[in-house]
Image (cartoon, grey):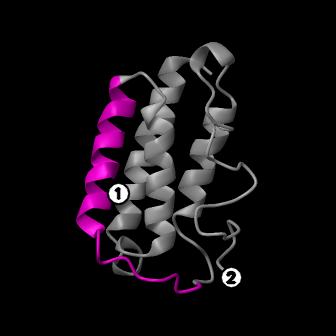
Amino acid sequence: MTIAELDTAIDALRRELTDVRAMDKCATCECFLGFVAQAAAHLKRLESPSAAGARDEFEGWLAEAEGRMRSCQHCDICVPAGPYQRFREALAATPPGGRDVAGAEGDDAGTRACGCSPEGCG
């Protein structure tokens, strides 16, 4: 994956998570905020203006939600899981020179931020 393709994946993640955040049920949900925190952690390891901008935006969302986070509502479909999973797949396709962070320290590739499957919580 080229840097341009990675920037495209970052921009898509940003757009999709912005849409998810607009949903009342997701904006302060521990699942959504967990995915945002994981995405921000990945973005800290990438060197691009797109990564820095998205990271700063995501960290702002986390700061805004501080003290207002609520427990998972066990939705039939966990809306933020899809965008985050697509982003992870893009990271996994990044060559070592592009700093593949899919298996970075502190992140278990076999788990999700809230313990959900892409199909739903629980």
Please tell me which residue is depicted at 69% across the width and 38% down the height of the picture: 103
Residue 82 lies left or right of residue 37; in this view the side is right
Marks 2 and 1 in Cβ contact (< 8 Å)? no
Instruction: State the count of labels.
Output: 2
Residue 27: percent from the left, percent from the top?
35, 72
Q: Residue type at mark 1: give it.
A: Thr
Circle 1 sits in a helix, a strand or a loop, which is it? helix
Residue position marked by numbered label 2 in the rendering: 122
From this view, report whether residue 119 is shown above or below residue 93.
Answer: below
Spot the residue most to the bottom. Answer: 73
From this view, report whether residue 23 is shown above or below residue 90.
Answer: below
Q: Residues within 10 Å of mark 2 (few under 14, many from 20)?
A: few
Residue 110: percent from the left, percent from the top?
76, 54
Q: Distance between the residues labelled 2 and 1?
A: 24 Å
Q: Residue type at mark 2: give it.
A: Gly
Please tell me which residue is depicted at 61% across the width and 32% down the height of the picture: 101
Residue 50: percent from the left, percent from the top?
36, 30
In front: mark 2 or mark 1? 2
Residue 36: percent from the left, percent from the top?
44, 56
From this view, report whether residue 66 is shown above or below residue 100.
Answer: below
Magenta-drawn stretch contains 45: no
Spot the residue most to the front. Answer: 106
> What are the residue bounds of the magenta stretch?
49-74
Q: Quadrant of residue 89?
A: top right
Residue position marked by numbered label 1 in the rendering: 18
What secondary structure prevails in the magenta region? helix
Please tell me which residue is depicted at 36% across the width and 74% down the height of the picture: 28
